[in-house]
Image (cartoon, grey):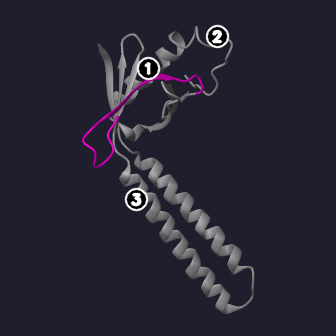
Amino acid sequence: MIGLSVTLKSSRILLLATVAMSMVTSFSVGLFFYNASNDIAIHHLALIFSFTFLAVLISVSIFQWRKCSPIRLDIANDGTMLLRQRRKGDNVDRTNKISLHHDSVIWHGIMVLHFSGNEDFRHSLVVMRDSTDKISFQRLRVSLLWMRQHCLAEVSKKNEFNGNLN
């Protein structure tokens, strides 16, 4: 019996953060080359290189963001979890039975989830508030906090769960 089923899509907040980091990187590379010489031709080349570098980084970021397909996370009432992912162009869902790793970070606005499963399957997800609707985000957060407290307690009593701001 499924207690919660959440479809997670790519976050626009993470895309904007990636684009912002690309802009800062491009600006710093351009400044580095701009200050390297007093020649005006090198200054122009530095600006051209900086803008080209920025365009490439932003293009790659947007391409990777658009390539991501939605992921469905099913959590049963007993704490078992299924991760379903469909790659773009495929008609078959890849389903993995997973368990939440104790290193996962669950905050109010962001969750960094680490999963492990059978056959050395490891997966990490960054879930932002815009990855799903508000109610599903809150339900997922509460379910994961419950699982962390009840299901992982007997597995790792000695480990301290850092990074959890309740």
Q: Is 85 or 33 nearer to us in this picture?
A: 85
Asked if the stretch drawn in magenta spans residue 28, the answer is no
Which residue is pictured at 56% across the width and 58% down the height?
A: 21
Residue 65 placed where, x, y %? 41, 53
- Which residue position is annotated with label 1? 142
Mark 2 element type: loop
> Which residue type carries mark 2?
Lys
Quadrant in which the C terminus appears: top right
Q: Residue reaching furthest left?
A: 91
Q: Is 159 or 37 nearer to us in this picture?
A: 159
> Which residue type carries mark 1?
Val
Q: Which mark is residue 157?
A: 2
Mark 1 element type: helix
In this image, 160 relative to 123: left or right? Answer: right
- Which residue position is annotated with label 3? 63
The answer to whether residue 58 is above or below residue 78 is below
The answer to whether residue 5 is above or below residue 67 is above
Mark 3 element type: helix
Q: Which residues are magenta?
A: 85-103
